[in-house]
Image (cartoon, rainbow, N blue to C red):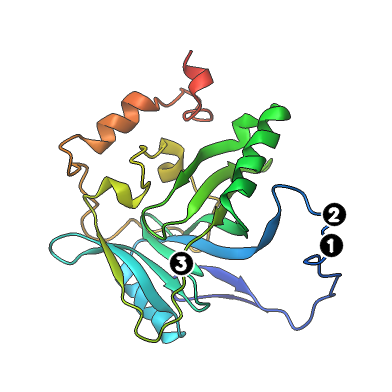
Amino acid sequence: MRVVDPLGFPYEFFYQTEHVERMSWRYDLHIPGELVRLDHFNQVTPDVPRAVEFMQDLGFRVTEDIQDDEGTVYAAWMRRKPTVHDTAMTGGDGPRMHHVCFATHEKHNILAICDKLGALRRSDAIERGPGRHGVSNAFYLYLRDPDGHRVEVYTQDYYTGDPDNPVVTWDVHDNQRRDWWGNPVVPSLVHRCVARARPRRQPAAGRRPHRRQRDGRDDRRRRVLLHPRAEDGEHEYKLGNQL
């Protein structure tokens, strides 16, 4: 059965599926870049408070969010399982799907994926990372699959299953919320999403996040200088295309 939720995102419900062999014990088949499970989705919506309220009505809890000094919420990370999130509601023109994420065991699995892509001369599939998020504290890597869908590989966030687990709130001016090491966001990560959900997307409500960072540098200017966009818009984030 296919439905569209009040936020405009399509869902499909199914009754049964064919089970296959569980690979957890098949160490003879494991590879260094092993993926272990589906972890979360990231959804873009023009009204984050409305999205949060809807997800809370379904039993989700907020673990982290991004706010300004006036309490405007720009994004929220929400969970059912005891990790940082099963979905994130990110402010922007939508409804759109930003990425799907798979978990792996440890950081070295992500580095092995990068090494293998390099050996295969497929480094152009790496969109951003490896790095460490501020939000969630997880080690991450963003990839693009052959169809252009954004896939994150992610590991080592933290346990959130305590009934009184406190919400972590990040200041929208804090550049380390995106990347703990302060690396700038590549333009494609902001402007390009996996797919547009139906109905037609709506512009984001309210004020957009400020561009000025705490260190006094302008975030938009840094992104343009470090990651100029190509005229065709397809390779704006790869250093090799700038040389």
Residue 206: name its quadrant.
Answer: bottom left
Query: What amino acid is found at the position of numbered circle 3 in the picture?
Result: Tyr
Give the residue number, with chain letter if any, for mark 1: 26
Q: Position of residue 200 (x, y in %)?
A: 46, 59
Query: What amino acid is found at the position of numbered circle 2 in the picture?
Result: Leu
Give the residue number, with chain letter if any, for mark 3: 158
The crowding category of the residue bearing disc 1, from other C-alpha atoms within 10 Å (few below 14, some 14 to 19, many at least 20), is few
- Front residue of this view, candidates 76 and 234: 76
The crowding category of the residue bearing disc 2, from other C-alpha atoms within 10 Å (few below 14, some 14 to 19, many at least 20), is few
Query: What amino acid is found at the position of numbered circle 1 in the picture?
Result: Arg
The answer to whether the residue labelled 1 contacts the one labelled 2, judged by CB atoms less than 8 Å apart, is yes
Mark 1 residue element: loop
Image side of residue 117 versus residue 178, left or right: right
- Front residue of this view, candidates 84 and 228: 84
Residue 223: name its quadrant.
Answer: top left
What is the residue that sits farthest to the top in this orientation? 243
CA distance separating discs 2 and 3: 28 Å
Image height of 157 relative to 116, above or below? below
Image height of 12 relative to 38, above or below? below
Residue 52: name its quadrant.
Answer: bottom left
Mark 2 residue element: loop
Please give the name of the residue rendered at 33% of the width and 40% of the height, measured from the top-left corner. Answer: 182
Give the residue number, with chain letter if any, for mark 2: 29
Q: Position of residue 136 (x, y in %)?
A: 41, 60
Image side of residue 77 versus residue 127, left or right: left
